[in-house]
Image (spheres, grey):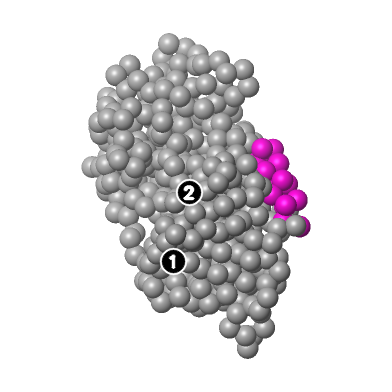
Amino acid sequence: MSDTQKDIIILGGSYAGTSVAHYTLKHILPTLPSPESYRVTIVSPSTEVICRPACPRALVSDEYFDQTKLFVDLQEQFAQYGTKFRFIHAHATGLDTEGRVATVTLVGDGSQLKLDYHALVIATGSSTPSPLLSLNGGGRDALKENWKTFRASLATAKSIVIAGGGATGIETAGELGEHLNGRAGFLSSKLDKPKVQITVVTSAKDILPVLRPAIGQAAEGYLAKVGVDVIKGVKVESVSPSEAGGSEITAKSEVKLSNGKTLSADLYIPAYGTTPNTAFVDSSLRVQDGRVDTNPETLRVDKAGPRVYAAGDASNYARPAVHILMEAIPVLAANLKRDLLQAAGKTPPSDDRIFKADESETHLVPIGRSKGVGAAKGFKMPSFFVWLIKGRDYWVSMTGNTWTGQQWAKET
C-alpha cells in the first residue's frame, strides 16, 4: 500500500456493511479526485453472509431453503471491483478515534492488525442470545452444526419453551409448531393434544409489541392452531442449567418464571432481543443499551471525529429493522461522499442529506409456512399477503440483490 492510500474501513459484513461497501465502490469513489488512491475494506468474522430473518425456519430443516442462497460467499460478491476492495477475516477488537486506527483480531491465528482509516463505518450488527438464530460472530459451519445438534433433539423433545414475544420468538414458535405438530383444521380454534408442548413466555402484556394489540391477538390464534401456548406479562427469572439454550443448545432445563411457576423444557430457546457487537467501541461513544451513539439525521458518529459513521443494529439511529436500514444507506453514503470531497479539498455539491426513520407500524411476522400477521405503513395486512411478501421464504430470494450490489446499481 502506498503512503497516499486512503482506506475506507467498514467494520461488519452483513446488510449494512455490504450495502455501504457496494454503494461506495459504485457511486462515491469514481467521483473523487484521484479515485485510485482510495480502497474499501470490509472486516468481518464470517466469510459468508446470511439472510438472518430466515433463521426461525432454517433451523428446522435444510430442505426449506436453497442453501446457496441462504449462505453466500462474501468475497465473491466484491470480486467485480478488483483491487479497489479488500476483505479481512477478523473481529473488530479496538478503536482509537484520536489516532484514527481500528484494531482487528484475525480469525484463525489470533494475530492483531492496526488499520489506519480515512473514513470508518461501524456496521458490526448484533448477536442473538440463542446460537441458533444468527452467525453470532462465527461462520456457516458453526451455525449449521448448531442446527444439526438441535434437529437431532427434536425427535425426542416433548416440551419446548421459547423466551421472547417479539418477531423472532413468535416466528420460531410458529415454525416449530407446524413442523412438529401440524396445523389444526379450518373449523378448530386450537390444536388438540399436540405432539410437542410449545410455550412462549413474554414479559410484555402483548406479543409483537411493535404491532397493535389486535394483531398480536390474531397471532396468538394462529399459534394455538399449531399447538403453541403463550404466557404474557411474565418474565423468565432464571434457567437451570444457566447454559441451557446458549452454549448448551439441547440441555433439558427448568425455567423459573416471575409468577412463581417453573416450566420443564426438553429444549429452551432464548429469543428475546439482541446484543450489539460494540464491545470494541469506547463507552463514551455508546448509549446505555450498548449501541453506538449516532446522529439520527446524518448517520455520523459525531463524538468520534471526522468521517466516522454507524448504521444497522450496532447503531442507535433507529429501531432495528431491515427496511429502515435500506432507507438509511443512501443517506449515509451521501454524507460520506460529501465528507470525502471536503477532505480532498473539493466543494461538495449539496448540504448534508437528512435521514428520517420510518416509524410507522410496519412489521411482517409469518406464523408457520402458510399464515402470518402484520402491518405496512400503518395498514393491517391480511395473512395471505404476509405469506406472499415474507412467509414464502423469509426474503431469502430477495437478498441476492443486496449481496451482489445490484440493489444499489443506481445512486438514489
Q: Residue at x 62, y 85 (%)?
A: 188
Marks 2 and 1, how far apart at CA: 17 Å
Residue farthest to the top, as pictured: 3
Residue farthest to the bottom, as pictured: 187
Amino acid type, callout 1: Lys
Where in the figure is residue 25, as x and y percent of width and height? 48, 35
In the rendered view, would you say 104 is above or below 351?
above
- Disc 2 secondary structure class: strand
Q: Which residues are magenta?
A: 140-155
In the rendered view, would you say 118 is above or below 166?
above
Q: Quadrant of residue 184?
A: bottom right
Amino acid type, callout 2: Ser
In the displayed structure image, the side of residue 407 where residue 139 appears, left or right: right
Q: Residue at x 66, y 47 (%)?
A: 250
Q: Residue at x 29, y 19 (%)?
A: 98
Q: Is residue 187 magenta?
A: no
Residue pointed to by mark 1: 232
Where in the figure is residue 330, as x and y percent of width and height? 39, 47
Pick the front one: 306 or 163: 163
Secondary structure mainly formed by the magenta segment: helix
Residue farthest to the front, as pictured: 260
Residue pointed to by mark 2: 238
